[in-house]
Image: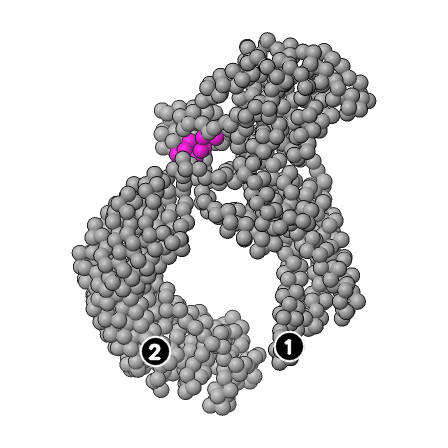
Amino acid sequence: MVGTEMLAAAAVSQVARKIGEIIGAAQGEVTLCCSFSDDLESIKDTLVYLEDLLKNAERNSFGSERANLRHWLAQIKSLAFDIEDMVDDYYSSKEQFEGSSSYAQKGSLFCSLSNPVISKVSMVHKMKSKRELLQTRQHLPNQYHFISHINSVVDFDEKQTTSYRNSDITLFGRDRDLENLMDMIMQKSVSEISIISIVGPMGLGKTSLAQLVFNDARTKAFSFRIWVHVSMGNVSLEKIGRDIVSQTTERIEGNMQLQSIKNAVQTILNKYSCLIVLDSLWGKDEEVNELKQMLLTGIQTESKIVVTTHSYKVAELVSTVPPYKLSALSEDDCLNIFSQRAMAGRGDPLFREYGEEIVRRCGGTPLVANFLGSVVNAQRQRREIWKAAKDKEMWKIEEDYPEDKISPLFPSFKIIYYNMPHELRLCFVYCSIFPKGSVIDKKKLIQQWIALDMIESRHGTLPHDVTAEKYIDELKAIYFLQVIERHQLKQLRYLDASTLSITTLPPQFSSFNKLQALDLSETELMELPSFLSNLKGLNYLNLQGCQKLQELKSLDLLHDLHYLNLSCCPEVRSFPESIENLTKLRFLNLSWCSKLPTLPNRLLQSFASLCSLVDLNLSGFEFQMLPEFFGNICSLQYLNLSECSKLEELPQSFGQLAYLKALNLSSCPDLKILGSFECLTSLQFLNLSNCTSLEYLPLCLKKLQNLDVSGCQDGIVQSCSSSSGSSPTHQFSEQAEQVRLSIVTSEIIPEAPVIGDLKGKKKLASASGLDVVPEVVTKPNETGDTPLIPGRPFSLSSSHSSSFASSSRAPLAYVSSSDVSKNNNLVPNGEITGISNTLDNFTHNSNI
C-alpha cells in the first residue's frame, strides 16, 4: 500500500531539517565560494515549499492513472537523499581532517580528496547542480499537467464507517461482547457520567459492535440516542458539540461561540439521559483531554458515552472506566463472514480448494474476511480470483479491483498513516525491512533509527533514545507495533535468535507450532532438543557457525524443511541417516563440519531420495571418491565440493546430473579424473582452480559460460593444444563469457584450441594468464570491429602479466607496460581507444 515513493514528504522534511542545522555553521566559516550558503538556503527554501505540496501529493497518488505522480514523488525523495549524502560526506571529511593530530597526517590529508578545502570546492559545484535539478523538478507537476491530482481532495474518512441507522447488520462472534457492553451501559450510575471505550486494531468491528449497542432495544430507555462520527486525526470540539445538540430537542444558533456550545452540551447531559456514541475518535492528547472536559458534568447523571478508537492511548485518556479491549474473531466466525460475503458455501468446489486457507489468512479480522469475500464474489467462478485471494498481497488486490465491486480494505489505515508526523511515519516504514511476522528487538530498532538520523526531538531537549521510546509507544498505541505476550508467541512465524549466548532451547519453543523460519546461527547450542519435531511447519533452519553443536535429534522429523544450513559446525559427529524423510529439502549445506570428515554410503545414498534437492554444499569433506549412486540426485542444480582434499575421482554416474548448472571443484589437489561429463548439458559454471593433479578437461560442455582452471598443471592445457581444431574440447567456447587461466606455467597456452580459436566468439568477456595475446583478438572481425571490450584486468604473476578482455561490444583493452614491450604491434591502426598500464587486483571467490 505504501511504496518507497510515499516517503517523499518525510525524506524532504528530514533533509530540510539537517540543512537548516548546518547553515549557521557554514555561514560561520570562510567559504571558498560566496554562493555556497546561498545554495544551501535556496535548497532549504525549496524543500520547505515542497514539503506541504508533497503531503497532498502522497495522499492523492493512489490509482493506476496517477503513475506519473508516483514517479515524481520517487524522484523528489531520491534527490533529497542525494543532497543529504553530499552534506554528510563533506562533514565526514571535515571531521577527519580536524581530528588528525600530526602535521604529517594533515599534510597527507591536505593533498588528498579528504581535505575539506578540496571537498568544499567539489561540494559547491555539486550543490549548485542539485539546486538547479531540484528547482527543475519542482515545476514538473505544472509542466506535465498533473498538478490537479496533487490539489484534488481525497477524503478517505467519508467511507470508513457506515451509518448508525443501519439496523439490519449481522455480526458474527460478538454476542458476548454485546452483552458485556450492555451490562456496563445499563448499570445505574453512582457518580458522574460514564465514558466507555471500545478499543482494538483496525478492522476488528468496533464500529459494527457500537451499532449493535446503539440499536439494541434496551437502549430505548434513554431520552436521546446520539451518534457522532469523529473525523480521525481531527477532533473538532465545535463540530462534535453541534452534532450532539442537533440530535436533541435543544437548539443552538449558527453563530454561537465554542464556550456556548460546551454549555449547551453540559445542559443536555444534565437534563436528559443520553446515550452518545463517538465513533473513530483519534487525536492529539490535548484535544482528547479537552473533549473529555466538555463531556464531564461533575454531577451524577444517567447519561452514558461510548467511544470507539483504534488507539489504546486515546482510550485511556478519555475513559472513566477501564477500556473494553476487543479481541480477534475465531476462524469459524471469519469463515461465516467470508462465506456470506462471497455467496459461496462449503459445497462449492473452489471453496473446498481455497476457502480454508483464505479464511486462515484473515487472522481473526472481520474486515479482511469481508474484503476477501467481496473479491471472490466479484468473479467467484474464476479460479485465479480465488488463488489471488489466497496468495496475493492485499494492497495489490485492492489496487486491481474498482471500489464499486469490492469492499475497500485500506481507507482507515491510510487515514492513520497520513496523520502521523513525518518523522514517525519514516520510522514506521523502516520497520517494513523486517520479515512479516518477525519479532523485533526494541533496543536494536532504536539504535538503528538513531544511527540513520531518523529521530527528531520535537522540542530539541529530549535525548534521542527517549524520543525513540516515545515513537515506539505511539506505534504500539495504534496497534502498528504490538508487544509479544507469551500466549501470542504461538502465532510466531519467524524467529531470529542468531548470535545469542544460549546453550539450550527453552521448552516454550515446543508451542511455536506456527513457526516457519528459525535462525539459530552462531549460538552456543550443544544439541537440538527432541521437541523440535513439534514444529511441523518449519521450512527454514539455519544452524551455521554453532561451534558447540553435537547432536541433531529429531532433525529428520521436520518433513516440511526446505532450507538446512549446518556449515561450520565443527563438533557435529553424526547426521541422521533417515534424512530421506526430508523430501521437500531444497538447500543443504554441510560444509566444514570437521568432526564429520566422511559421510557413510547409506547417508549419501539417502541424498538420492531428496527429490527436491537443488543446492548441495559438501566442501571440506575428506572422502576419496563419491559412490556411483550419487548421480541419482537428479534434481541437483548447484554442487560445491571445493577443498575436498582427498577426493581423487568422480564416479561415472556423475554425468547423469542433467540439471546441474554450477559445479565447484576448486582446491581438490588429489583430483585426477572427472568422470563422464557428456550428459551435463546444463552446466554453465565450472571451477577447477588449484586442482593440481587434474589430467584433462571434460568434453562437450556446450553451454559452459565460466571456466576457471587457474593453478592447474600444464597437462590440462597441453591436452587441449594437442587436440585438433575440431576437437570437442573447445566446443564450450561458443558460449564462454569468462575463462581464467592465470598462474598456469605452460608456454603453449596461446596455441590451445580452448583459447586460440577465439574468432567469432562474441560472448567471450574476459580471459587471463596469457604470455602472448592471440593474434585473432587484435584483428577486426567480419563487421570491421575489433572484438575487445572494457574488462577488469586480473592480477597475474610477473612472468605472465598480460591481461585482456574481449568482446564485440566496445573497442577497449587493458594491457601492462611489459605487454607493450613484448609486442609493439599489439594494436594495429590505433583502433583500441584506451590503454591502461595499471593492473587491478582480482580476487576470485572459490565458492559458487
| Residue 358 can be seen in this image | no
Q: Is residue 551 above or below residue 65?
A: below
Quick one: label 1, few (<14), some, or many (20+) residues within 10 Å?
Answer: some
Instruction: Examine the image and state in which quarter residue 703 appears.
Output: bottom left
Is 103 displayed left or right of 746 in the figure?
Answer: right
Return the disc, 2 or 1, that comes first in the chain's sequence.
Answer: 1
Question: Which of these two is toward me, 404 or 730?
Answer: 404
Mark seen at residue 711: 2
Image coordinates for residue 122, horizontal then vertical, percent: 69, 69
Mark seen at residue 106: 1
> Residue at left 56%, top 36%?
477
Element on which disc 2 rests: loop
Mark-to-mark CA distance, 2 and 1: 44 Å
Is 378 displayed left or right of 145 in the figure?
Answer: left
Magenta stretch bounds = 357-365
Question: Which of these two is toward me, 553 or 2?
Answer: 553
> Residue at left 42%, top 76%?
767
Q: Is residue 109 magenta?
A: no
Element on which disc 1 rests: helix
Image coordinates for residue 481, horizontal then vertical, percent: 52, 40
Question: Which of these two is toward me, 614 or 670?
Answer: 670
Is 202 displayed left or right of 617 in the figure?
Answer: right
Image coordinates for residue 755, horizontal then vertical, percent: 38, 78
Outermost right residue: 255
Instruction: Examine the image and state in which quarter residue 739 appears.
Output: bottom left
| Residue type at numbered disc 1 | Lys
Tell us which disc is closer to us: 2 or 1: 1
> Residue at left 58%, top 29%?
315
Q: Quadrant of the N terminus?
A: top right
**Label 2 with label 1: CB-CB less than 8 Å:** no
> Residue at left 65%, top 40%?
60
| Residue type at numbered disc 2 | Gly
